[in-house]
Amino acid sequence: MSFLSRRLLLKAAGVAAGAIAVPQLTAGGARAADAMAPALQQNLDACTPPGDPLKALLERNQRFSKVWQTLADGTSPQERMALKLRMLEDGCQIDRLALAEGQRPWAALISCADARVAPEWIFSAGSGELFQVRVAGNSAFDDGIASLEYAVAVLGVPLILVLGHSGCGAVKAAMGSAPLTPLLEDLVKPIRASLRSGDDLTKAIEGNARYAANQLTKRSKVLLDAEASGKVTIKSAFFDIKSGVVKVLG
């Protein structure tokens, strides 16, 4: 069903924006005050892949990486964009009217703020599919963890992926000795905590992604309990900009 029916529109008119009343999020978990209308839920789930969400992300990334690797130097910027857009022809987009009433993302990400890392492209996703937290160095910072608590406890997101990437400037800065501004020092502090002696930049980036993933359950009882009960899976991964390939880290 691509569009909301007239019946659903009438029903949605009586539902507060977002379809879920303001949730009560506590240390012990979260609950939504009102249940989402079944018809609205069906529309919001229109692009949710069946089965394992991590497998679905990796399969979509395979499509992206194959196209990404065809964007050769001989083509113009416009031709390269046209090739990327073709990749989305087999994709899926949730109805905008449903999105105006609520959201049911099927995966959440902590990824870097780097302009070269665009999760919607990397995983061929439409609006409403991915719940995203982005910060330089893809660290598990307080506001980001709180956002993921909401994603898991209220929205029911079953997967969190911490995504590092090749050539990460934040990790490189954390490895260096150049003076930083006070705010940048705060930003790289958790990255420095993840560093191991002798690691090159790529190994440090991978280690930082693993460290951030581990921090989620160490610093959030909501996420710890959700993982223990099987409600959410937390993984770390590495995105290679040159190849476009995402690999899951052990």
Image: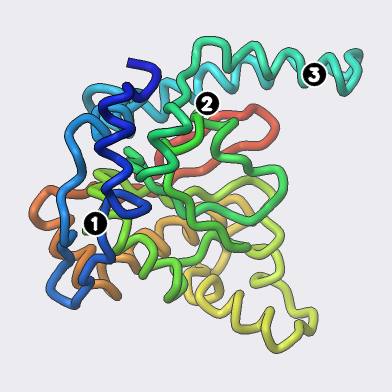
Asked whether, in this view, residue 129 is left or right of residue 244, the answer is: left
Residue type, label 1: Val
Residue at 50 percent of width and 20 percent of height? 62
Other residues around mark 1 within 10 Å, as few (<14) / some (14–19) / many (≥20):
many
Asked whether, in this view, residue 221 is left or right of residue 67, the answer is: left
Check disc 2 and report the residue beneath it. Answer: 124
Vertical arrangement, residue 38 with respect to residue 178, above or below: above
Residue 174 figure quarter: bottom right
Q: Quadrant of the C terminus?
A: top left
Judging depth in this view, the residue of 82 and 19 nearest the camera is: 19
First in sequence: mark 2 vs mark 3? 3
Q: Quadrant of the N terminus?
A: top left
Check disc 1 and report the residue beneath it. Answer: 154
State how far apart marks 3 and 1 are (Cα): 39 Å
Vertical arrangement, residue 22 with respect to residue 154, above or below: below
Check disc 3 and report the residue beneath it. Answer: 80
Which is more foreground, mark 2 or mark 1? 1
First in sequence: mark 3 vs mark 1? 3
Q: Position of residue 52 (x, y in %)?
A: 24, 29
